[in-house]
Amino acid sequence: MGQKTMGIAPMVMAELADVPLGENAPAPKASNDKSQSDSWWDMVRILLYALVIALVERTFFFQPYNIPSGSMEETLQIGDFLFVEKFAYGYSRYSFPWGRLLPAFGRMAGHAPQRGDVAVFALPLDPSRDFVKRIIGLPGDRVQMVDGVLYLNDRAIPKVRASDYVEDQNGYLHHVARYRETLPGGKSYYVLDRESQGEYDTTPVYIVPAGHYFMLGDNRDDSDDSRGIVGYVPAENLVGKAELKFFSIDERKTSVWTFWKWPRAIRFGRIFRAID
């Protein structure tokens, strides 16, 4: 008797395993569908949160920029990507992506720029274009170039010869004279001098108006700055202070979009470097 019972029990259990257990049998499938739906919604929410955070970060704190020209060589090179600290000088309408549509309201919640800062600003003649230059003249300063030497308030800024800046021009190494300037207050940086007598090597005296700044590019003979089309930059036009290079790629070898070619084009020595 015992052996017969043991033989039937597995058969009964096997049959029961395939039989729905009452009216609520489909419940596990519905629960699974709900779980998948929740999972997709969680993913969408995470993406939305990330988008909002990125938008807030870009609007109020740090905005990424790409350098398209050599006017700030060697401090900034074509293909450098940098973060601009937008709250460094407070906020104006030019601080926001949509702000150029707003009426002027000056600046709020900010600090005045320091002499020598590398700053991004909206071009006074065409505010749709952003430029990056070094702040040389503060309101009330007298600025002049004489034979390639920068004068500030009628005093020559120390300009000490340094090793050449070497650049690759279509496979040929080109040497450019490089100097280190040191502003009052101790801010020091490199400038390039490509010509013995460039167009802007000798200029008239510029007296910076109240509420404006005088900008120069570090690549002195190849820069559109306050000596030319830029003119004096109103404080309102400042977007922020350039703080950090977070990526750099040699665009002569590849573009930022052809990422599979990055290994031979990334300039690793320029990544995560503070901007002097």
Image: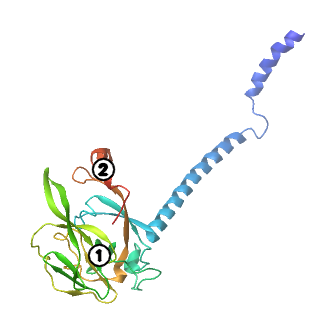
For residue 183, which numbered disc appears in the image? 1
Residue 114 position within the rendered picture, expressed as x and y whole percent measured from the top left = 36, 77
Give left or right: position of 102 versus 146: right
Q: Which amino acid, mark 1?
A: Leu
**Residue nearest the viewer, comparing 86 with 175:** 175
Q: Quadrant of residue 108?
A: bottom left
Q: Residues within 10 Å of mark 1 (few under 14, many from 20)?
A: some
Note whether 34 is above or below 195 in the view shown: above
Q: How many marks?
A: 2
The residues tagged by marks 2 and 1 sit, at their Cα atoms, a distance apart of: 32 Å
Residue 237 position within the rendered picture, expressed as x and y whole percent measured from the top left = 34, 80
Give left or right: position of 25 versus 84: right
Say if mark 2 contacts mark 1, CB within 8 Å. no
Residue drawn at the location 57% of the way across and 50% of the way down: 40
Note whether 219 is above or below 172 in the view shown: below
Q: Quadrant of residue 98?
A: bottom left
Residue 107 position within the rendered picture, expressed as x and y whole percent measured from the top left = 42, 83
Q: Quadrant of the C terminus?
A: bottom left
* Label 1: which secondary element: loop
**Residue nearest the viewer, comparing 32 with 195:** 195
Q: Residue furthest right?
A: 1
For residue 266, which numbered disc appears in the image? 2
Residue drawn at the location 31% of the way across and 78% of the way down: 184
Q: Quadrant of residue 224?
A: bottom left
Q: Is residue 127 visible?
A: no
**Closer to us: mark 2 or mark 1?**
1
Q: Which amino acid, mark 2?
A: Ile
Q: Residues within 10 Å of mark 2 (few under 14, many from 20)?
A: many
* Label 2: which secondary element: loop
